[in-house]
Structure formats: structure tokens, C-alpha cells
Amino acid sequence: MEEGFQKKALKRLIIFIAVQMAFVGFFVWLTDPFYQYHAPFFGMDAVLNDRDNQMPGTIRNFEYDSVLVGSSLAENFDSSFLDQTYNCSTLKIIRASGSVADLLYYLEMAQEERALKNVFWCLDISSVEASTEVTLYGQDTPRYLHTKTVLDDLPYLFNKEILMEKIPSMLAYAHAGLNTGGKAYNWARGKEFGEAWAMRAYDRGNIGPSALSGDRDYTVETVLIAENIALLTRQVEAHPETKYRFLIPPLSLLWWDCAYVNGELEQRIYALDQAVSALLCLENVEVYYFQNEESIVCNLDYYMDMVHYSPDISQYMLDAMAAGRNRVEAGNWKEAVAGLQKLTAWISAEGIFVYYGTEETFDEP
Amino acid sequence: MLFNSVIFIAVFLPLGLLGWFLLQRLENPFFAKLFLVGMSFWFYGYYNLQYLWILLASLAGNYLVSLLLEKRCTGRRALAACGILGNLGLLFYFKYFNFFLDNCNFFLHTDIRMEKIALPLGISFFTFQQLSFVIERYRGNAPHYSLLDYAFFVSFFPQLVAGPIVLHSELLPQLQRRENRRFSPEGFYDGFTLFILGLAKKVLLADSLAVLVNAEYENIAALDTPTAWITITWYMMELYFDFSGYCDMARGIAGMFGFRLPENFDSPFKAASVREFWRRWHMTLSRFLSQYVYIPLGGNRKGKARQCVNLFVVFLASGLWHGANWTFVLWGGMHGLAVVFETAFPKARFRRDWMNRLATAVFVTLSFSVFRSDSLETAGLLWNRLFAAGNRGMLLGVCNTLIFPENYAVVRLLGMAAPGLLNAFFLCCFLLLSVLGIGLICGPKAEEWIRAKGHTRAGGFCLATLFTWAFVSLSQVSVFLYFNF
């Protein structure tokens, strides 16, 4: 075949490829489902349904002056309620594990990007006992999510899953008005709450209270708890201009009984006590405590598993915070801890048997 | 590094081509060769730098043998034997030692434990390539090359990790030919288009077929007879497009650099006998085994009985070469028996050619089901499913595994709007992929298609679309742990 003809064919092939690739790249940039480059164009609502992939982009590119931080326990909070109540614009910062280190990674990223007026933090007790290592950028995490450079963005711009799954999903969600505005990352749709569902998540086993040998030694864990609390307080102290409102969510009686059965009850209460005590010493902090709400904690109709409560409870907590109810201060915190100890003792001795039969039905060793 | 990766296509390949052709403008080709050898080492060491040391040690050892063969007139036989044993020893240690130890423990009732030895990428290929070189050096059929040329021959990245098994006489004269140093639009175009078709075969077809195959091989006990047959047929197609795609990519990349690698794949399912199948499937391995095992054993020169034994030994070796597991030995043995049968009874054939082709295809597909199995036990279970599991109406369940990004939107839409149609849709996907796969296997080879249509405007558009589609298929959004809490 003559050389001129080959050259022409080669040129044509390269042009075809360049045009197609440019089109694909431009389309992904325009729709940008992970918000890596910009907030939605054309007044479209931002669809937030893929927290781990969307979080870094939203932190970098969205407009906000407040953040709602937490684990899945905070995911169903209606952030538009916070916007109206506190006259702010709130971005949800959610990490499934809710570990302090991971959430602080995001929070510090947000503080680099924007001046924050408010931080609303739904503080999961177990997060205070989690590892202090950031676990966000592991081997399976796309690198481009956490870097600002476009040089590593090829796997995002030219990605079949982004093109054929993420973008169509995003458009469909936007069309249906799901996971937009205050309902970002909301997982409650399609979920069932109630005793039957909650109890499915907890197999108590054939254990009566007297069969247990008591609490484990948790000296080692105290170090980790102290490190997490130090991380938290350092963050708060470094930003005196920001108001921090911590919400301590109500975990169900199943969770507390599980802690009791595993010999970890004292450790859990210790962690909570240490964290809240340290936070209450700081001027720009308010703490709202819901663990003493017996009518919620001991009623499994509000839960879908040991910890995840219904959207009604999420809203109840926001309403309470807005009205200044459920607030604990240095003066009444010890009383609250004593109340928790009493409640958990009652749960393990009596409360749990409302759902798991009476103690007498167990075979004692 | 993999050919089907973003780093290779977007960074390594353009950089390699640019450097190679720019350095070719220098009078002395030394720098261009050095550059490409360096790139090949980068390619090989990309995932694990330690493997590079093994390649370098093997390369240095064989080069030393070649050098000594050049300098010595006596003791050449012992030297060549050392070279051959060294290569086989390296292969044994990295590829077969774990297998050997496991079998010692099993048969001798011992409990010797050692840390598992990782198998370096492509060791079977570069070892065989160097084995052939050492033998040819001993026979006086190969000159002693410069270290750089030899390193180029062994490490040339398009053929380094999965073949074809190239002979020195095929590659090095091309490297030394002056006219090969010039950029040729024709060679580049043909190479690039062959690469695109290979990439599409691997990424779009083989990887799609693998979705069903992997799911069903995980679940053999639950298969019924029709789905077991579907699974092994799809595996055969997956392997076909995987290997054929790789060979096309390797030859295409080499073509872009101005080199021609030997053909390794020639429409194997057009073969009318198992013997012919092996003349079309992994052709360079068959050539190697024929030249360096079959003929030295006596080939067909010592009577029919001995020929049959020789053939069987060659196929056992081929099986063992493919992997250190009894499944590969059994697979090799099955092919050996088939070829021995064809040799002993050349007239035992169907009258019609298409029937011979079909019988060959069925035999090959059945034998490759053993090849894919993790153990003889699994293979046995699979064969039980193939012949004695009855029909439990599981076809639709198997088809339901076919969820790809390409059909994601339709699946979601149907799931919400008309769930009753989902099964029919998955069945359509299954039929479409089956027909496409079989059609391409029976159709013209990639190079024939390029010659016929690849240079037209429509052909160019199709190729560009395949490239874009395959390229966007290389990246995946990772699935995060704790996705739902």
C-alpha cells in the first residue's frame, strides 16, 4: 500500500481517537459525578449518594460555611434544617467508620478550603476507640480523589463505570430529587425499622447475667482513647472562631447489652466520659446528650439494628439541639454519667429480657 | 506492567515510541537500543522490582555461557549442558518447587514446610527463549551477540511476559537491519490497529465472558448439565480472546516499533484435528517443543510406537509447562492421548470436515475445563456436572450474572419499571455475547480484517471507537468496604 495512503489513514485514525477521547473527557468533566472539578452547573441539584467517592470533591468545590460531621449515624440528618436554624450553609462530612482520625482528615481539608462558622459533630462513642491512623487512602482508593492535580485524573475522566453507571445514576437521582439538598447521603429510603429488624442484628446467645465474668481490663485501650480525645481537642482549640456542637446519639439497648456481654461496658462508658469531659472544658463547644433518652434507647421500634435509628430520631435530635434541650455542661455531666451507668445496669439486668425472654429461661452453668 | 492498563497505553507506550524513533535519528543505534532495553526493564520491574533481578541474573548467566562457548573449543558440551541445566533449574525452583514439595509431602507422608516461592512474571517464556539460544549456540547456529543486542532479544517488552517465544534468528537480524530504524507509517498503522483489536478482544470480550465464568467456577457444585456446558464453552471463548488478544497486542506493539514477531495464533478453532489445533494455538510453544523435545527424542524416525510415546511425552511437558498442578498434567495428557490416537488411527475421522472441526472443538473445550480447574477434585466435580447433573432449569440464574457497566442503566430501569422482563434481558445479553464470540472465532483473523477494512474511513472509525471503549474499560471505580455502614 502506498505510503501517502497509509499516512492519511493513520492521521484519520488518530483524529478519530482524539475526538472521541476529548468528547468522553469533556462529558465526564461537565457532569462530574464525584465533583472533582466543580459544583453542579446549570442550577442542577447536587446528588450526594456515594460518600467515599464524592466527599473530597464536595469539600474542595462546594460553597459552605458549616459542616455536619459524623458516621452513618449522622447521615440521615437533614442539613437544610441546620441551614435554616443557624443561618448557615452546611456540608455533610460522613465517613462510614466515623473514626476521629478519618473525620478530622476531612474536617481539616474543609478548614483549608473554607472559613467554618459551625461544626455539628455526631460523635459515635466507638469512634473514640478507633485507630488514630487515617484509613481513607488505602490501596483500593482511587488516588485522584485525594489530590488536586489533574495529572492522575485519567482513571476518572476515562472510566466506563463513571460513564455508564455513575453519571446515569446521578442524572436519575437528580430527576427524582433523591439524595439532594438536606437529604444528602440519606440511606433511610427503603429501610425498615422495628423490633424484628433490630433483633436480627444481635444474637445475644444463651447468656444470663450471672454467667459473665465482668468487665475486661482495658488499660491498653485507654491509651487509644486518650490519643483520639487529644486529636479532637487539638482540632477544637486550633479553631476558636468556630462553634462546635457535639451530639451524643442514642445507641439502642442492644448495643449496650452487647458491650456488657463482651465485658466492654465499663470501657465504653469510660470512653464517653473522658471524651465529653474533655470537650466540655473547651469554650467553643456545646455538647448535646441523647443517651439518657430511655424512651428511645429502650424502644427497638426506632432502630433497624443495634445503632442505626430512624430519621424521626435524627430530626428529634436536631430539634432538641435547636431548642437547647439535652445540653450537658461541666456541672451536670457527672450526673449524666451516673444516669448512664444506672440505665445500662438496668438494661443488662432487666431491660434486655423484654426482648430476649426472662433470665430464668437461661441455663446457668 | 500490563498491555491493558492506563499507565501502559497513556504513558509507557507513547514514551517508548517517541524515545525509540527520536534516538534512531542518531547515527549510532546504540542509544536507541539502550533506551528500549531500559524501557523493557521498567516494564518488567513495574509491579515487582525483585523480579527484575531474576531476569537480569538469568540474562547474565546465559550471556556468559554464550561468551564462553565463543571462546572455548573444548568442553563445549559440558558448558551447554550447564547452560541448559541452569535454565531448567531456575524454572524448576521458581515454578515447580512448591508443587514438588507438596507432592513429596503427600506421597512420602512427610511434613516439610517452606515459604511459598512466588512465580516471577513470564519466567517460562524468557527461560525457553534463552534455552533455545544456548542450544543453538552450542549447535553453531547462532552467533555470539553483543550484550546489548542479547539483552534486547531477551527483554524486548512486547514478547517478554507471555510470548510469543521468539528465536534469536527472528528478532536480532531485524534489530540490526538499517532500514528498520526508520519510522514506517505502514508498519505503525498495521501495528497500532492490530494492538487496538487485541485490546478490544481482551478488555471488551474476554473480560466480559470472565464475569460468568468466574462466578460459575466458584459455584461448580450447584451447576446443572446445561449450565456446566455453558460455563466451559464460555471459558474456552474467554481463554481464546484473552490469548488471541494478547498475541495481537504483542505483535501490534512490536509492529509499531518496526519489528515483526512470529505468529502465535492462527484461528485454532478452524482446526479439524487436535494435531492441527496445536499448529494453530500457541504456535511458538509447539515449535519449541517440537524442535527441542520431540525431534531430540527421535520424532517419527524410530517407528510409529516410539513416535506415539514421543508425542505423549511432548504433550505432558507442554501441560507441565503451562502450570505446576496435576490439572495441567492431566490436560497435557488428554491432548497427548488425542494426538497419539490421531497418529495411530489416521483414518478414524468423520467424512465431513465440519464434523471433524466440531469434534475437535468439543474435545478441546472439554480438556480446557480441566485446565481451568483448581484441582483434580474440582475437575472431577465439573465433569460430573457436565455429564450427570440433569437439567434443573438454571440457565436464567446463570445469565443473571451478566451485569456490566454497558447494561447497568437498562438493568436498573427494568428492575424498577418491568422486573418481569429482567430475565429475558439477561438471556438476550447471554445470546448476544455467545453469538458474537462464536462469530468472531469462526470469522477472519484480525490481520485479515485490517487488510480488508482497516484502512477505510468506516474501518478507522470502528477502530477508534473500539480503542476508546476499551480504554475507558481499563479503569474501575473501586468498591469501598463498609459501603452500607
Image: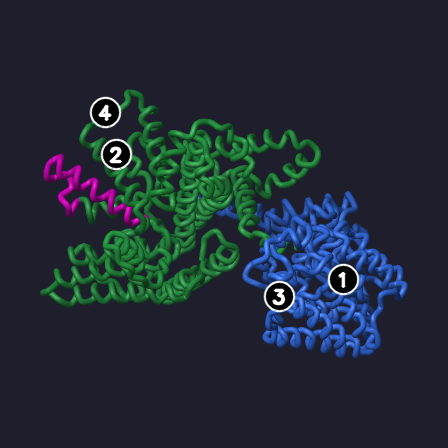
Chain colours: A blue, B green
| 3D distance between C-alphas at marks 1 and 3 | 22 Å
Q: Residue at x 87, y 59 (%)?
A: A319
Q: Nearer the viewer, residue B444 or A216?
A: A216
Q: Are marks 1 and 2 on the same chain?
A: no
What's drawn in magenta, residue-wise? B295-322
Disc 1 is placed on an element classified as loop
Say whether residue A308 is magenta: no
Say whether residue B296 is magenta: yes
Q: Nearer the viewer, mark 1 or mark 2?
A: 1
Q: Is residue A6 above or below residue A142?
A: above
First-in-chain label (1 vs 3): 1
> Residue A263, which numbered label?
3
- Marks 4 and 2 close (CB-CB < 8 Å): no
| 3D distance between C-alphas at marks 3 and 2 | 66 Å
Name the subunit of mark 4. Answer: B
Disc 4 is placed on an element classified as loop
Q: Where the C terminus of chain B falls, by quadrant?
A: bottom right
> Residue B348, which numbered label?
4
Amino acid under label 3?
Answer: Gly
Q: Which residue is mark 1?
A: A249
Task: Using the rendered view, name the quadrant where residue A140 is placed.
Answer: bottom right
Q: Is A341 displayed left or right of A316 in the figure? A: left
> Residue B265, which numbered label?
none
Q: Where the N terminus of chain B falls, by quadrant?
A: bottom left
Amino acid under label 2?
Answer: Ala
